Image (cartoon, rainbow, N blue to C red):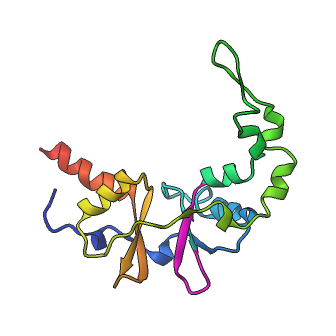
Amino acid sequence: MEEGKIVKDIMLELFEYPHIPYWFSIEQVIKVMKASFFQTPKNTYPLVVLVFDEKYNLLGTVTPREVLKGVSSSHNYSSTNLKVNPEDKIEVDWEKVFGDESKNLAQKPVSEIMNPAKHFVDPLDPIKKAAYLMIHFDLPVIPVIEDKKKLVGVVRMNEIFDIISDEIIKK
């Protein structure tokens, strides 16, 4: 990899990325996701929304996966309600998984379903550090924190993959 490449070289600025306050409902997050990810022509993968407190401190992230888990009838995912037959087919009452209850569940605050932010990089950190943390902790994005407190952006797996894969295929 080209020496000297740092996080700042590939990060997206904070306001280039969708973000919401923690008190938004899951329904509001769905609307933000649909407007941000699914109706724009540019590739925005990974689909992640940043979640902030009232002082603009990053609390966590939420993806479509957490949203769908949050609006599904959780009792349908419990092991007591799953029946596995001899052919290893899972039997679930699929009509109840995303049924009428989903609209009620969508009124819960996003803070109940978000993934807490625990891992960060500095803008001057090497890209390899961001790659390691993202791989090791299975993160689709990693927040970029300046002066150990101020969130300035994010690094997506797309950019990490692009740089590292280019270097590998050049050899």
Q: Residue furthest right?
A: 100
Which region shows up in magenta? 52-63
Q: Quadrant of residue 5?
A: bottom left
Q: Quadrant of residue 59?
A: bottom right
Residue shown at the point (50%, 77%) measured from the top left: 15
Observer-nearest of 37 and 26:
26
Number of marks in the image?
Answer: 0
71 over 108 or under it: above or below: above
Query: Can residue 49 be seen here?
Result: no
Query: Can residue 131 be seen here?
Result: yes
Left or right: residue 4 compared with residue 51? left
139 in magenta = no
Image quadrant for the C terminus?
top left
Image quadrant for the N terminus?
bottom left
In the rendered image, residue 60, in percent from the top left (x then y), is placed at 54, 68
Observer-nearest of 95 and 79:
79
Residue shown at the point (42%, 51%) measured from the top left: 138
Residue shown at the point (41%, 79%) measured from the top left: 152
Q: Residue furthest front?
A: 80
Left or right: residue 132 compared with residue 156? left
Residue shown at the point (49%, 58%) measured from the top left: 44
Left or right: residue 49 compared with residue 69? left
125 over 88 or under it: above or below: below
In the rendered image, residue 106, in percent from the top left (x then y), is placed at 78, 59
Observer-nearest of 140 and 92:
92
